[in-house]
Amino acid sequence: MSKTIKSVKDVFLYSVLSKGVTFFSSILLARLLFPEDYGYLVMVTIITGFIAVVLDVGFEYYYIVKVDIKAEDSEKKRVLSTVFMLRIIFNIVLFLLQFFGSYYAEVYFEHEIVGEMLRVLSFMYLFTIFGKINEAILKKEMQFKPIMQRKVTAEVVASFIKVLLAYMGFGAMSFVYGTLVGSMIYGLSLQWYNKFEFEKKYVNLKEIKKIAYFAKHSFVSGTGLFFTQQIDKILLTSSFGANVVGLYNFGYGYAQTAGSYLLGPQNNVMFIFIANNQKKPELSAKLKDLMLTLIYFATPLFVVIFLYAKPLIVFIFTEKWLGSVELFQIFLLIGYSSFIFFPFTSYLTAVGELKINTQIVLVRAITITLVLFTIIMYSNDIVLYAWAVAIITIFFDSIKFY
């Protein structure tokens, strides 16, 4: 338990520093860029978001969940070498798919810049090959400090590059160049620190089958989660202009700031904690206690932000983002829901109940798709659209608690 507490402290302290820099840079970016630039970013995110599901298909999580921390070194090497080989193959395929597929994307979205952004970001998958495996090893051992140190460095450099390029007039391209450099720094620095060595002799066919079975459920669940999280933006880009899409994304993104900044970095700690303590009967009670603490802490904060949303947005980001205020307030309800249900977010996956988690995610994806498609067919009201997203998201967030 002491190792868990230390990990939480390390993650929190470095996250405060990292997210402070990121938040400050996001304010500068919002002042330098325009809603259209954020609209292009949404279009790119639709593609990269799905590829991220494949990227995070569950190879490394198999090692974290299935291999005992006290297992023999030979067993660990067998799993890690097999996982790393699969990671190399997958990432190269993803790089090629996104690079050449970007030409079709720019035709579909009718914006050449979308294709340019996708081609730059495709190189990111080559650097994450080294980052993923070393990150998994350190997480399994609850060594979050070296991970967070390198994440902070990568995010600071990435943020600086984004702001600098935005100031120089690169527009939406500033997002992708900064992200690429940050990914390169993070992946290579983790390899330099942990020095994972791939040993071909340990690659095992039986292990590949086990990993593939685990990854299959993880992929299906991840795909459903992706469509649940992105279907609103996919339908949005087909029905509204880049300006409205940008305002929508701006409101949604900043409404999640409290949760993503304060609790987001703790997701991995919570996942490992649940996975390592899933057989202990007191686990559920501890998670519920944490949830009550979050409710007491979060409620006053979210109420104040909701009531003073308009003056806060105008003061921090200028009046050009005034059109996002009502959307921001609606999505703030999702932010509050995600915040208080945080202890149970990864519970089903952490205890190995991937099938149940997959079923919930798929039902959620189907529901939100049908509802949003109906709204688009009969109305172009972006506010009604946002309310539908908020209500469905909150409902399915609460299911995992029960």
Image: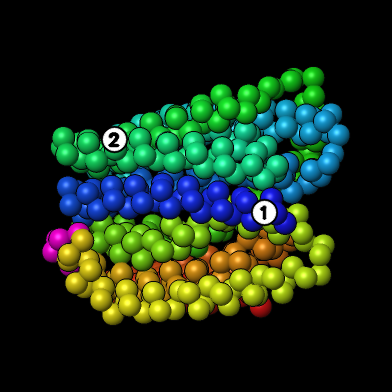
Q: How crowded is mark 1: few (under 14 residues within 10 Å), some or many (20 or more)?
A: some
- Which residue position is annotated with label 1? 4
Kindly identify the residue that appears in the image at 17 percent across and 39 percent down.
Answer: 167
Q: Is residue 385 visible?
A: no
Q: Is mark 2 on a helix, strand or loop?
A: helix
Residue at image position (72%, 56%) is 1
| Circle 2 Cα neighbour tier, 10 Å, few/some/many (<14 / 14–19 / ≥20) | many
**88 with respect to 15 (left or right):** right
Residue situated in front as seen by the camera: 172 or 358: 172
Magenta span covers which residues? 317-322
Image quarter for residue 124? top left
Residue 71 location, x and y as percent?
A: 84, 39
**In-image side of 66 versus 316 (left or right):** right
Foreground of the two, 296 or 185 = 296
- Disc 2, disc 1: CB below 8 Å? no
Q: Relative to residue 217, is residue 12 drawn left or right?
A: left
Residue at the spot of label 2: 161
What secondary structure predominates along the stretch shown in magenta?
helix
- Percent across and percent down for residue 171 are 20, 41
Name the mark nearer the viewer: 2 or 1. Answer: 1
Residue 274: quadrant of the picture: bottom right
Quarter holding the C terminus is: bottom right
Amino acid type at circle 2 is Ile
Q: What residue is shown at x 62% (from left), y 51% (from top)?
A: 6
Q: Earlier in the sequence, mark 2 or mark 1?
A: 1
Q: Point out residue 81 in the picture as x, y percentages from the top left corner.
A: 73, 28
Under tag 1, what secondary structure?
helix
